[in-house]
Amino acid sequence: MCGMSQPPHSRSSASPAPARPDASMSLLTHVMDHSLDEGYAEAAARREAEGTAGLPRTLKAKLALGAGLVLAAMVVTLGAAEARIAAPVLAKERHELIERVERADERADGLERDIERLRTTVAERQRAALKQTGSGQGELVGLLSGATEVRGPGVKLVVDDAKGASSGGGDGPRESAGFSDTGRVRDRDMQKIVNGLWQSGAEAVSINGQRLTALSAIRAAGDAILVDNRPLVPPYEVLAVGDKKRLGPAFQDSADGQYLHVLQESYGIRYTLSAADEVRLPAASSLTVRTATAAEQQKGAS
C-alpha cells in the first residue's frame, strides 16, 4: 500500500456558479433580450443582401413611386380646394338661416305684444262694464269676479320646495298619484291650498301676483305649475284677503291645512303662514264673460 498522501480537494472549484436573480423569469428575460423576432431580422438581412431594401433602385420602380406620390398630392390638393370653395357657400347659407330665424322671432315677439295689448284692452273694458251696472252691486261684482284690484287685511302663505329637491322616483303615496318627486310642490298641492283658503273664508286669492277667479285653472306642464296658462316658479307666495285673525287658524285647522302640514313633516316641503294688516291683490289679467244681461235703466234716467 502506497503511503503517499493525497492532495486535499479544493472546495472553491467544486462550488456551483451563483444563479441569476431573474432566473425564474426566463420567458420575460428572453423577450426583453430578443425584442425583434429572428425571422424579421433574417428577412431584413436578406433584402439588404439582394439590394431590395430601402428606396427602389430601378427606374421603373422610381417612376411608379413618384407617380403614386403625385397622385396622393393631387387628391389632397383637390380636397382642400373643394373645401375652400364650399366654405363661403356654407357660411352664406348659415347666415341666411340665422337671419330667417331672427326675423321669425321678431314677428313672433310682435304678435305676442299685440296679443298682450289687446288682452289688456279687453280686460279694461270688461272691468269698466262691470262697474257700470247701474246699481250698488257693481263693486261687489267686480270684487267677486276678480275684475278690480283688492286691498285689505289677510294672510300671506309662502310655500317652497324641500331643500335639495330634484326629480326622482319612488313608491310613496305621492308617486302613485302621479308625482315624480316627493320634495317638490305640485299643482295638486296648490289646488288643495287655494281651495282650503277659499273654504276658510278668503274673499280673494292670488299666487305670485296672479289673481284667481272662479274660472282659474291650476295645472302642471312638465315640472312647472301653471296658473291660467302662466308658469310660476318657487317659492310660491299666496296672498288671501279676509279676516286676518280667523283666516289663518281656520286654514290650519282645515283638512287642506293639515294636508300641507303632512307635506312639511313627511316630505320636507317648507311653508310659512303669517297675518298681514294689508295685502294687495291685482286685478285678473283676463276675464272671460260667459253670460251677460243688460242693466235695467233706473227710473227717472233719460
Image: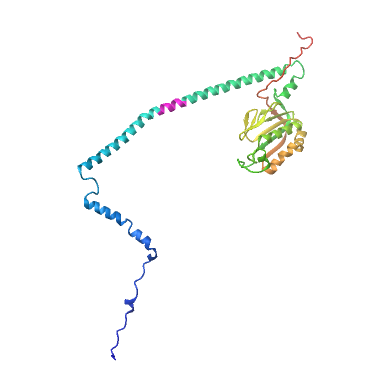
Chief secondary structure of the magenta portion: helix
> Is residue 95 within the magenta segment?
yes
> Is residue 144 within the magenta segment?
no
Image quadrant in which you'd find residue 129: top right
The residue located at (65%, 36%) in the rendering is 186
The residue located at (48%, 24%) in the rendering is 100
- Left or right: 77 with respect to 136? left
- Against 48, is 142 above or below? above
Task: Residue 243: give x, y in percent of width and height.
Answer: 76, 31
Task: Residue 209: give x, y in percent of width and height.
Answer: 66, 29
* Magenta segment boundaries in residue numbering: 90-98
Task: Residue 139: give x, y in percent of width and height.
Answer: 74, 21
- Left or right: 227 with respect to 10? right
Task: Residue 144: give x, y in percent of width and height.
Answer: 73, 24
* Residue positioned most to the left: 59
Image quadrant in which you'd find residue 220: top right
Between 94 and 201, which is closer to the camera in this rendering? Answer: 94
Q: Quadrant of the N terminus?
A: bottom left
Snapshot colouring: rainbow
- Against 257, is 283 above or below? above
Between 95 and 222, which is closer to the camera in this rendering? Answer: 222
